[in-house]
Image: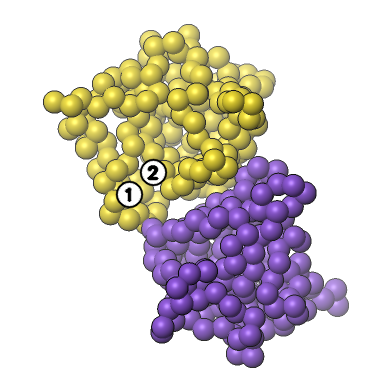
Chain colours: A yellow, B purple
């Protein structure tokens, strides 16, 4: 669980990365950046900061911010209510993203799972995304990603986001954020 | 019809605007920016420069560049093969965009149609998009847009683009570009 203070601090930090990436936010967006710690309480290692631009029944677009070496844990987007799972494209805008998907395992990966969580990272085909580079995932593909040493800002273009339906490899993960009410 | 030289010049100019907006392109994207003059042969007045990031059966994302006062002419995206028409969100990244949609007509619009084309502009509800501001169009909504005096860079997040199906109000418009083969 994140305290309000931790969430506020992460939001301020995320705003700094978005600014470096030259991305303009409205004041209401800047204030409401989603901070996801996936219920593990180790935001620096396992976490993601999200600006949601649009999420309709058909289309979703977001800006993702990852702090240096921050990891979005392994998951997939299954079919929901008879509709094919979420199809998503990640386009790196700033920094470097290491994306892992099914395929031939890389011998010396550039990223590694957060300490103690190794068992829940099972796909090891590495895709490196520098600014202007992008990758499209077909629905239900297991994937995880981690920022390089500078951090990363990544645009996500996809079909509808239904975060509550995501399936994480790590059984301890809780996708929907819980912020302490104090 | 655009000559190769005109198209190359427009591409170089569009790259300049994308750079001002802080948007990173790969070399192959920078070389292949689409230059659409809509068959009218007056690119400065009626035209659009496009970087297509992804266009699958479900999702499309693009960066649009408009030179100062350049206009994307009035059109709509109809239902195609039983599927609802294209749903699109325009998000201004840099500059100013004046977007016109159905609704109460604005008394003193900030933009005006290209000279001689006035009859083919019929919707006059004005939406002004500055950096960070966005607008979502439901399928089949008539719309046109024009950049302000600085030009504009706008992200488009949408369902599949099927440009050949677009319906323009101006019967002289030909959406798919024709470039002189010389």
> In this rendering, does residue A88 appear at all?
yes
In this rendering, is residue A91 above or below B97? Answer: above
Q: Position of residue A74 (x, y in %)?
A: 50, 21
Q: Chain of mark 1?
A: A
Q: Are marks 2 and 1 in contact (CB under 8 Å)?
A: yes
**What SS does tag 1 mark?**
helix
- Label whose residue precedes the other's in the sequence (2 or 1): 1
Residue under circle 2? Answer: A51
Residue at image position (62%, 48%) is B159
Camera-nearest residue between A80 and A172: A80
**What SS does tag 2 mark?**
strand
A62 sits left or right of A158 in the view: left
> In what quadrant of the picture does the N terminus of chain B appear?
bottom right
Are labels 2 and 1 on one chain?
yes
In this rendering, is residue B43 above or below A64? Answer: below
Q: In the drawing, what numbered circle is on residue A29?
A: 1
Camera-nearest residue between A71 and B104: B104
Residue at image position (59%, 53%) is B87
For label 1, the crowd category at 10 Å Cα-Cα, with few meaning under 14, some 14 to 19 and many 20 or more, is: some
Q: In the drawing, what numbered circle is on residue A69?
A: none
Q: Chain of mark 2?
A: A
In this rendering, is residue B80 above or below B116? Answer: above
């Amino acid at each position: 669980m994140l305290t309000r203070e931790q969430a506020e601090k992460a939001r301020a930090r995320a705003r700094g990365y978005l600014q470096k990436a030259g991305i303009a936010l409205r004041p209401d967006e800047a204030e409401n950046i989603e901070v996801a710690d996936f219920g593990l309480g180790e935001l620096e290692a396992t976490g993601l900061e999200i600006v949601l631009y649009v999420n309709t029944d058909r289309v979703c677009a977001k800006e993702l911010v990852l702090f240096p070496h921050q990891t979005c844990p392994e998951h997939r987007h299954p079919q929901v209510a008879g509709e094919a799972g979420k199809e998503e494209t990640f386009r790196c805008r700033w920094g470097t993203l290491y994306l892992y998907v099914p395929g031939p395992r890389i011998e010396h990966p550039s990223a590694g799972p957060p300490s103690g969580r190794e068992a829940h990272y099972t796909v090891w085909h590495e895709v490196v995304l520098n600014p202007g580079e992008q990758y499209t995932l077909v629905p239900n593909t297991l994937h995880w990603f981690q920022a390089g040493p500078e951090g990363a800002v990544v645009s996500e273009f996809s079909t509808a986001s239904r975060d509550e339906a995501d399936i994480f490899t790590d059984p301890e993960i809780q996708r929907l954020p819980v912020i302490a009410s104090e």
